Image (tube, rainbow, N blue to C red):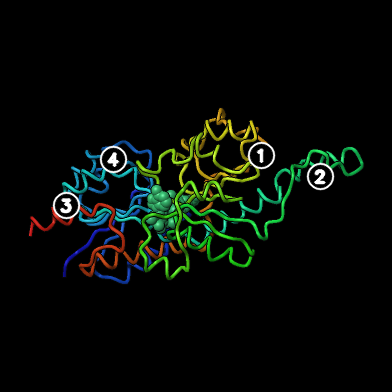
Amino acid sequence: MEQFKIVVTDYIEPDLNWEEEELAKYDNVRFEVHQLKFAPQEELIAAIRDADVVVVNMAPMTAQVIGALERCRLIIRHGIGYDNVDLKAATSNGIRVANIPDYCPEEVAEHTIAHLFACYRQVVFSRKVLEESSRKGLWDFSGVPRMFRLSGKTLGIVGCGRVGSRVLRKTKGLEMNYLICDPYLSEERKRELGIECVDLETVLKGSDIVTLHTPLNEETHHMISGPQLRTMKQTAYLINTARGPIVDVEALALALRENWIAGAGIDVYDKEPPDPSYPLFGLENAVLTPHLAWNSEEAGWDLRVKILEDIRRFMEGKPPRFVVNAEVEEVLGRRK
Ligand SMILES: NC(=O)c1ccc[n+]([C@@H]2O[C@H](COP(=O)([O-])OP(=O)(O)OC[C@H]3O[C@@H](n4cnc5c(N)ncnc54)[C@H](O)[C@@H]3O)[C@@H](O)[C@H]2O)c1
């Protein structure tokens, strides 16, 4: 029987006992767990050199590390992003790289809706009003920004994939109108969702809240900058739970300071965590959360279950559910 060695380079869970128990059910699997996020490269290489499958959270899988792997055929990135894995090196070495892009769309949609309410109902600002009124001994609502009824307003969704489509579904009871921009949705998918798409400018012009759910790539980098913010309504809010660099944060800071728009809800940053000089710190019309949209007990478990599913698929000779370096198939094809 073929023997498999599965090695975890680093992990964020309290322990991986569940994975160990699950994999102990197979006679032909050796499962090793390390915490090598900050270890010297030689130590990382020594731990994974003869692994068939490497599961990595944050340890840097550089070209040098990948080049030293003798048997590896699959690297699984614990999470969605995979910028700590040198994809080119993996591809040229015939190693599939998998990520788990579908463990937390419910949470990110819920967090987006939390931002929607936090912005529209001034939830964070209200605390200051409460404490000041308490000090004065009488209600003082003089500094409260103008508030509007959400019902009947228009929600602009930019990117209607896993997260965006859930925001659409989950907000249906709020009696809002929608403007949706996603140039890559198939006609069939649009029919399924019961939507029509418009261009970005139409979304920006017509929406009371604009929420971003695109991937970060060359096309979407700074997709929202000065001119786009100028296009939005003065009473509108911008929400970004997708990726920091989709929004030009300097332009957003200016827009918030000069009231081009009413406010913003942000969960993601160019640099993470952001430096203390982050331009939105100190702006009262910015609701800020620390890249936690993904987080829940359930999502944490889904991630573990889905990683184990990919390990099982590997042992059955099947590719993982999501391969991020599709070009590797050509390399693997040439080797057959
Ligand atoms: N804050 C968090 O904790 C967290 C967690 C998970 C995901 N995310 C981020 O959320 C975003 C959405 O994730 P997802 O799983 O829904 O991705 P997805 O791939 O399922 O959906 C993205 C959608 O954006 C569309 N799109 C691509 N380019 C576009 C453009 N230029 N204009 C409009 N639409 C465009 C695509 O067609 C697709 O439908 C990603 O940026 C992801 O990294 C954040």
Q: Earlier in the sequence, mark 4 or mark 3?
A: 4
Within-10-Å neighbours for mark 4: few <14, some 14–19, many 20+: few
* Mark 1–mark 2 distance (CA, rounded to whole Å): 17 Å
- Where does the image place residue 126, in percent across and percent down from the top left? 76, 45
Q: Residue at x 46, y 37 (%)?
A: 270
Give the left or right position of residue 134, taking residue 85 as reference.
Answer: right
The residue nearer to you, when weighing 95 against 70, is: 95
Can you identify the residue that label 2 sits on?
A: 130
Q: Amino acid at mark 4?
A: Glu
Question: Please, what secondary structure does the residue beneath circle 3 have?
Answer: loop
Of discs 3 and 1, which sits in the foreground?
Answer: 1
Q: CA distance from mark 2 to mark 3?
A: 60 Å
Determine if the C-beta at disc 4 is less than 8 A from ligand 1.
Answer: no
- SS at badge 2: helix
Q: How far apart, in angstroms, are the residues tagged by discs 2 and 4?
A: 54 Å
| Residue 298 left/right relative to 321 | right
Question: Which label's residue is closer to the chain start, 1 or 4?
Answer: 4
Badge 1 marks a residue whose secondary structure is loop
Q: Which residue is mark 3?
A: 94
Q: Position of residue 167 (x, y in %)?
A: 53, 60
Check disc 1 and report the residue beneath it.
Answer: 285
Above or below: residue 140 compared with residue 149: above
Q: Nearer the viewer, residue 187 or 301?
A: 187
Q: Is residue 311 visible in this depiction of the protein?
A: yes
Q: What residue is shown with label 4?
A: 43
* Residue nearest the observer in this picture, 177 or 75: 177
Tell me the crowding category of disc 1: few under 14, some 14 to 19, or many 20 or more residues within 10 angstroms, Cα based: many
Q: Nearer the viewer, mark 2 or mark 4?
A: 2
Query: Which label lies toward us, 2 or 3?
Result: 2
